[in-house]
Amino acid sequence: MKNFILLLTFYLITSNFSIAQNLENQVLELENFIIQTDQDLYLSGDRIWFGAKLLKNHNSFRYSKLAYISIVDHKGQEVYREKMLLSGQDMIFGDIFLSENSPSGVYSLLVYSRWMTSFNNFPVARKNFLVFNPQLPEVSGEPSLFVELNPVENPSLILLHTSPEPELIELQNSDGKTLQIIEQVPSLKKTFMKIPAEKNLSLIFRNKKYSVPQLDWIWNPLEHSLKRENFNSDGKYLVVHTDWKIIEEIELKEGNNPIDQSLIIDYETYKLTVLNHQFKPVWTYQVKNPAFVPHGKVMLTSVNPINQPIQAELSGYPNPSQEAFVLVKQKEDSFLEDWVDILNHPNWKQFNSQNFQPVSSVSNLHLIKHDTIYLKDYSPMFGYKPQQLDPTVYFPEVTVPKSFSFSLPKSTFDEKIKRKIYQTHFEVRDEVVELTSPFTPDEVFILEDYYAFESFEKFAKEILFPLKIKKSKTENRKELWVANTDNYQVKFDKKPLVLIDFYRITNLEELLSIDINTLEKIEIYYHRNTVQKTNLGEEVGDGLVLIYTKNNEFALKNNIPNSRNFLKDVRVPRSPIMKTDLPIPSSNSLQAMFPQLKLTKGKTKTPTFIPDTAGEWALEALIFEKDNYYRISKQFRVNLDKSDGEIEKRD
């Protein structure tokens, strides 16, 4: 994300509260997403696996239950859109196929909620990534210069350009006098430049002049304090925050303005935003917290033979940690990871031919309509159809075109092209997806324990105790009933809605005739509170039976029309089913995905996974609390031989 949540702006403008009063009387319930993808560089036609977690600053039931997902291309045009119900752990995860005709460039994956459209230019969660089309390798636009200005006592510039050739970069003062020249600056490589304590400095890049921004605010990382030279008495405030939580508010005074270190000790990064007397943002900076002590460790065999089971253990996290999202993915080039990190970092700015522009410019957030502040999708299917939201309309500043050219070394995408040729030649099929219920059922039955039953009807009668199959009293047919536990009495007098892979059945015979060996699990919802928490409306008011097939193939095998899809244009979270019986290596860039690992006392273990492709791999994990998260990564190697692995810990 390139922006910040400055909801304080709206609050102060509309309430006339002082800054001290606001901290004690804060009523805004803030939320935003954290996004993770399986790669930083994709070929056109590739499959993106992603996950996102909704973090929030409150425990209220009033938070969004529906996520809107968009992909915006290098021209700022939306090329993909879907809506997904959040899981019970406030997470979404799934896959997106890029078009085979996708041109090369910088793309953005956006995840947002309907509530965020209540604001003008809300800073929604965004993950920038690269797409390369071997048939259309050229990236449109001109080479660009990116700069990070460190706001410290002895400031420096970190430069990076996207020109395919080494370039000369010159620093000049206000009189046009050359202060420094750096020759042969390589493409896509960070270069440091010390700058003097002068005003009105300029950079010359490719015969164009760019003004270096003024350094008005100075951050002292050792003392955790902010000051401004030539302090203006016109009232200004400092807000310490994340993208979903206001941590501290300070009325700025002359000299050093320290922040409370005890409030930020558990945040690896946080943001500083200065507001003027009208509560409009005038400066922002993301701080990498030097006082943060990394939590946790990963224990994982560092060298592994191919086709052998592996299990990783994550431990040492704070007890409030709730769940983890884990990807086992192909290790990408370090320089590529650095480049994409810059594209996603709020401190890096992009110059254009006129002036200094952020990659995603900072705007003054305010409500479009005051009465829409709680316009949330916490009841997405009840009484209305989920909206079609266009992110380019609601969030124009995070969908600006990324119209600059860049050139990657051939070795960067050569390996990916070889993998694609290999998979096409040997007809390696894409991973089958497994649907994940976004709800918490009363009962779950795993079908692999019951395949010995000769029919679904016999299995239901003997095992599915919340259900009862009866003969109709008025017609010559059977009926399915679910337990009614209202008023502490148990009666089988309610008819549940039955869905197979979220498709409606036409009649009970369609369910009773299904081959039990094709099923994976069954979820049953019958208690009143459980049914209400699904937020699926009146149609499931008497109960719900969700049946999942092994490969999510009910609709495909039976040619079921989409009109029978209960969710229609809303989808549920999905994860890959990794095949372990392939006769040849899959060469997939994603070898395993575990989206909702629960932590107990700060630790968890991944399920066993079996890498089927040799090479360098990385296990990446996001560990979530309610309003914070931790990131950890561990590299390992998979060899073709059967040599013994070496255990290595990351502390």
Image (cartoon, rainbow, N blue to C red):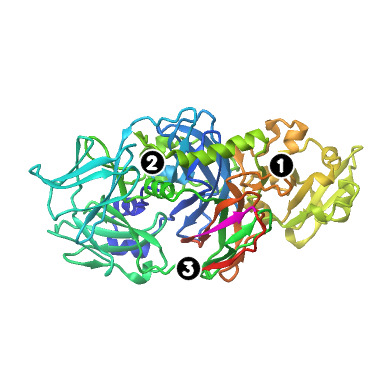
Disc 1 marks a residue whose amino acid type is Asn
Q: Quadrant of residue 45?
A: top right
Would you call the spot at circle 3 few (<14 residues within 10 Å), some (14-19), or many (20 or more)?
A: some
- In terms of secondary structure, where does tag 2 sit? helix
Q: Is residue 566 left or right of residue 633?
A: right
Percent coordinates x, y for residue 18 in the rendering: 27, 60
Percent coordinates x, y for residue 514 in the rendering: 83, 41
Q: Which residue is mark 2?
A: 398
What mark, if any, has residue 295 been given in the picture? 3
Q: Nearer the viewer, residue 183 or 427?
A: 183
Q: Is residue 474 above or below residue 532?
A: above
Q: Nearer the viewer, residue 440 or 23?
A: 440
Of the numbered discs 2 and 3, the one sitting upstream in the chain is: 3
Of the numbered discs 1 and 3, the one sitting upstream in the chain is: 3
Q: Which residue is mark 1?
A: 552
Residue 412 visible: yes
Spatial separation of the CA atoms under disc 1 and disc 3 = 38 Å
Q: Are marks 1 and 2 in contact (CB under 8 Å)?
A: no
